[in-house]
Image: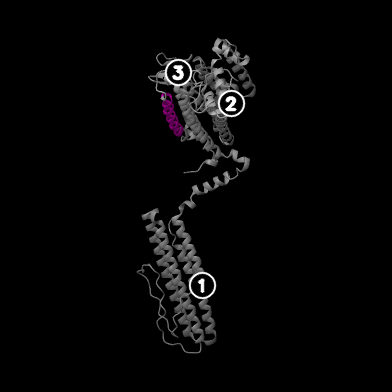
Amino acid sequence: MVFNSNKPKKFLRSLTRKVSEVIMEDHIEADSDSSHSSKKQKFESFKKSIRTSASKIGESVSKVGAYASKAGKELGKSVGKSVSKSVSNSVTKVSKSVGSSLNESVKFVKDVKKSKVAKPAKLAKPVKLAKPANLVKSANFVEPVKQANLVNPVKPAKPAKPAKSIKYAKLAHTVSGIFSSKKDYSKNSLERKTQDSELKKYVGLRSLTNPLWCLYGMRVSVVILSIFGLFMVFSSSSVTMITYGIAPWGQGVNQTMYCVLGLIGYIFASRLPVTVYRRYVAVIYVISVIAQFLTFVPGLRREVNGNAGWIAFGPITLQPAEITKLALCIWLPMALIAAKQAYERVQMRAYIPVVAGLGVSLLLVIAGKDLGTALIIILIALIAFYLGGFPTRWLIGSIFIAIAMVAMLVLTSQNRMRRILATLHGCDSKAAKGVCFQAIHAQYAMASGGLLGVGIGNSREKWNYLPYAHNDFIFAIIGEEMGFLVAAAVILLYVIIGWCILSSALKAKSQFISIALMCIATWIVGQGLVNILVVVQILPVMGVPMPFVSAGGSSLVMCLVAIGVADGLMRSNPQLTISK
């Protein structure tokens, strides 16, 4: 900000003009009684000298202001405070000197009135105006015209500050403050104040929907679950690793590496603007389809426990179905919004590309014999189609078609039928050693944990009684070692994540952001709920991992990246946006 030198110049001129008018009126009254023309000439010359002096002082102040402006630009923000302070002191001293000169002028007029009868004496040197400190004398500066000294005035004491000079000093102080505090006048500051006023509306129970609380609530919950999962993976997998001749901390170290990689993906995804997802949504979908198609390529395909939805690149294995989940959470909202806009022109034909794209991804997952992941994808799709404005009657028909398709897949698999029947009718002695083996030992683990658990690392079921205790059934080990309270706290963290994302989705101004957030919440919370219900034997065994907690690099990395996408979409809320 540049120091405006016109304001002090105008102020001094107006002040001098008013004082001159007062002096002129007193002079005319004094001359009305005496008819001495010489006095008029004397006062005219005196008035002219005062005006000339004040004008020159204003020019000097203007030069000082221009110098301060130039110095402020060259030296930059670091010396802005010192320049503004020197300008403020100079202007204050100028106002003091002008006030002193004006007091001398008023005293001079009073002395003239008292000596009305006496003849005018010889002209003498007038009282010189005090030069302002630190001001450079102008080359064109003219000395005031010498006036007659009728009576040798006694040197007055230090005059008090005139009221207007004090006001001007305050003005100069305000101007100097502007030099040193530009942030207070910036657009960023105004927007931050607006944001604070908006967020202060969330008091009492409304604070549960505070977008800022929801953002950090989701972040903290995800970090807690991820770190807690590292400890539980190490604890539940140590015995299994020793059984296979591997170091007991081998699975824990791998999980830590995947967690770090997932956090990097989280940070990267959270910093991407929404326009990137809109622009490259088709590319994201195509990448997911290609990755899922690689599960059928010989040499890359890897089958794990009957699930052929894995690909291997040397020692690294990857489950492309996790990429498909995230791709559908981003692609389906955009495709449904575009189809809804075209619905008025072409009716249901507008939704053919959307259904075809979903069908391709779903069939590739089902072909890999991963029914659990297929059910999660169907759940995500139903939420997206409902929120995307898909016609209700067609949506209901689609639900029945999905149920029929799942029933057909179950009926054509003897193993799946046994799991469902065991869940519905209980396990007999024969099934206890077969399809019910995992479910029964998971219940043993949960029952032996009690309220506070047996202590971390002290689980008995992880000693090869409960298969895959570090993967799909890690919640049973949590209940056994940490007890009911910690298991309930884990469920609460998933509830917090779901609530925060749901609250942000309801406040979103963009339909794309709203639907995408709901799809991600359905994926994370829905999959966690399914895993817990399988452990407590309410649902049959599906092979669905627990987000952020279960061992598995693909699941952990993609869940963290999905939360990063949700983080970026949540921060696009106008109440959380501050222009940079």
Where residue 49 appears, x then y in whole percent? 43, 76
Let me know if residue 266 is in the magenta part.
Answer: yes
Give 317 or 578, whichever is nearer the viewer: 317
Q: Secondary structure at mark 1?
A: helix
What segment is highlighted magenta in the picture?
250-268
Tell me if label 3 and label 1 are in contact, CB under 8 Å: no
Residue furthest to the right in view is 393
Q: Quadrant of residue 207?
A: top right
- Residue, disc 3: 310
Residue 286 seen by the camera: no
Q: Quadrant of residue 205?
A: top right
Badge 1: residue crowd in 10 Å (few <14, some 14–19, many ≥20): few
Q: Secondary structure at mark 2?
A: helix
Real-space CA distance between mark 1 and mark 2, rounded to the nearest whole angstrom: 78 Å
Tell me if label 1 and label 2 are in contact, CB under 8 Å: no
The amino acid pointed to by label 2 is: Ile
Where residue 346 appears, x then y in whole percent? 58, 23
The residue at 49%/30% (across/down) is 228
Residue 276 seen by the camera: yes
Real-space CA distance between mark 3 and mark 1, rounded to the nearest whole angstrom: 92 Å
